[in-house]
Image (tube, rainbow, N blue to C red):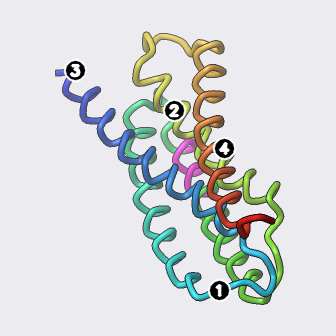
Amino acid sequence: MAWLVTITLDVVLAFALLCSLSMAGAWGELCGIRPGGDKSGLGGFTMVLLLAIVRWLAFALALAVVARPGERTWLLAAHAGLGVAATWSFSRLVDRVHGDRTVPAALGAAIGVGVPLPALTLALVRLHGDGRHDAPLAFALTAVALAALHGLVFHLRRRGMRPRGA
């Protein structure tokens, strides 16, 4: 029966990863909007809030399953805090773009790439680990791979926002 839980959580995490990559792209797009540019598509950023909720719930489910005794409460509280901070930040930075100001790429990358890493890395490593201890190498390799994937999506979307020939 443990195999069914693993497969189910893998599907949940795969879907959450797709949502997370879409959000990294949205952060890249937000950071790529230049002052004086077309802002007619900013209403589409409302979808990012829906993606944030879906990703947050999927990660929360995975964290609740992989948490060890005594960890569940603080893991979910930390996860909730990161989720609220990231969502609030996105909303505030969309307002900044509405005011014809840019969003610093470093800030967008830190939130769009960095925020999903702890929960996703922990869930993946624990789901597929031996269950007795956490392997630092597995954490490091998983975090680097996830950061590279999110970073690539962020960078490509941000670069795609620049006018051709600029």
The three-letter amino acid code for the residue at tag 3 is Trp
Give neighbour class at mark 1: few <14, some 14-19, many 20+ (Cα, 10 Å). few
Q: What residue occupies the far left of the structure in this picture?
A: 1
Residue at 73%, 59% in the rendered image: 108
Tag 1's secondary structure? loop
Where does label 3 land, which residue?
Answer: 3
Relative to 158, is 119 on the left or the right?
left
Where does label 4 land, which residue?
Answer: 151
Relative to 35, is 57 on the left or the right?
left
- Name above or below for residue 125 compared with residue 25: above
Tag 2's secondary structure? loop
Confirm or deny contact between disc 2 and disc 4 (CB under 8 A): no
Q: Position of residue 91 (x, y in %)?
A: 64, 76
Q: Quadrant of residue 95?
A: bottom right
User: What is the CA distance from the residue labelled 2 to the residue labelled 4?
Assistant: 33 Å
Give neighbour class at mark 3: few <14, some 14-19, many 20+ (Cα, 10 Å). few
